Image (spheres, rainbow, N blue to C red):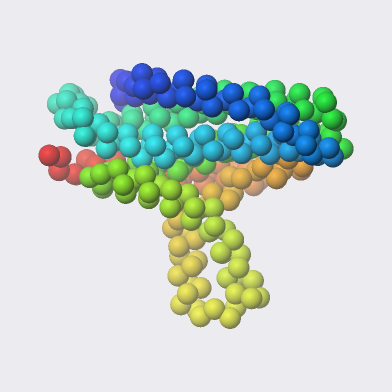
Amino acid sequence: MLPVFFVTVKGIFRDRVFHAILMTSILFLFIPSISTLSMRQVTELATTLSLSLISFILLLLAVFLGGTSLWKDMERRYTFSVIGLPLSRQGYVLGKFAGIAGFMLLTALMLGTVACAVVWYASGIYPPSRPTLWSTIYCAIIFDALKYVLLMSVSFLLSSVSTSFFLPVFGTISAFLVGNATQQVYDFVHSPAGMTISPLVRNLTVALYYLLPNFAAFDLKVNAIYSIDLSLSGLLLTWAYWGVYTVIMLFLAATIFARRELH
C-alpha cells in the first residue's frame, strides 16, 4: 500500500492540484473586507465564509479526485501495470484512497490555518459579542474534512463498479446532496406532521436513513460561528460513525474491484 500511497500523492502534485488550491486560497484575503459589510457580526460572517470556502474546496477534491482516480488509471492503462506487480488489488484500492485522503487532510490543515488567521484578524477589527471558541472552529474544520473523506469512500465504491467517470462523479454529487438531507427527512417522518405518511413510506425512509451517509452530523459550522459549546459524546459518536461507515465502503470497494474483470 505504501508505494501506491506515495505514487498517488506525487501524481496529485504533478497534476498541479495543489497549485490550483493555492490560487483558490487567495479568496481568503477578500473575506475580511466582505465581512465588514456586516457591521454587527463581522467575526461571525468571516467564520461563515471561511468555513464555507474550505467546505467547497474539499467537496471539489472529493468529487473530482475520488470520483475519477480509479477510472483515470484504468483509462491510461496504469492499472494493468500495477496488477503485474506483487500487490493485491485490495491493496491498490486502499493505497489510492489513503493517498487522496492524506492529500485532502493536508489541504484541510493548510486552509484551516489560513481560515483561523482570517477569523483572528476579523475579530481584532470588530470584537464579537461572544468570545471566539477556537477549539470549536478547529473541530468544525476537522469534522468537515472527515465528512469529505467519507464522501470519497462512497466515490471509490461507485468507481469500483463503473466503467466511466459519469457514475462516480454524478453519483458522488448525488450522495452529497442526499446525505445532507437524510437527517431532516428522518426528523420529519418522526414528527407529528409525518405521522400522516403511510407506514410503508415511513419504514422505507428509515431504512434509507441508516443505509445512506448522514453528513448532517459532521456540520459544526453553527457551533463555530456562534461560539456554542460542543458535546463530547456527540463528537465521539460521529467519529465512530465515520470510522465504521468508511471501513464498510472501502471493504465493499476493494472486494468488488478485486473480482472485477479488467479489459
Residue sitting at 39 percent across and 37 percent down? 64
Residue sitting at 45 percent across and 56 percent down? 212
Question: Which of the 4 image quadrants contains residue 112?
Answer: top right
> Can you give x and y, in whole percent of width and height, for residue 169 in the image?
37, 44
Of 127 and 236, nearer the camera is 127
Left or right of residue 188, residue 177 in this image: left
Residue sitting at 48 percent across and 56 percent down? 178
> Can you give x and y, in whole percent of width and height, for residue 262 in the image?
15, 40
Q: Is residue 72 above or below residue 199?
A: above
> Can you give x and y, in whole percent of width and height, for residue 229 in the image?
75, 42
Placement of the C terminus among the 4 image quadrants: top left
Q: How many marks?
A: 0
Left or right of residue 16, residue 230 in this image: right
Q: Residue furthest left?
A: 263
> Can you give x and y, in whole percent of width and height, for residue 198 in the image?
51, 80
Q: Is residue 206 above or below residue 153?
A: below
Question: Which of the 4 image quadrants contains residue 138?
Answer: top right
Residue sitting at 45 percent across and 34 percent down? 61
Left or right of residue 206, residue 46 in this image: right
Q: Is residue 204 above or below residue 169?
A: below
Could one spot residue 88 in this view of the protein? Answer: no
Of 240 and 107, nearer the camera is 107
Could one spot residue 121 in this view of the protein? Answer: yes
Placement of the N terminus among the 4 image quadrants: top left
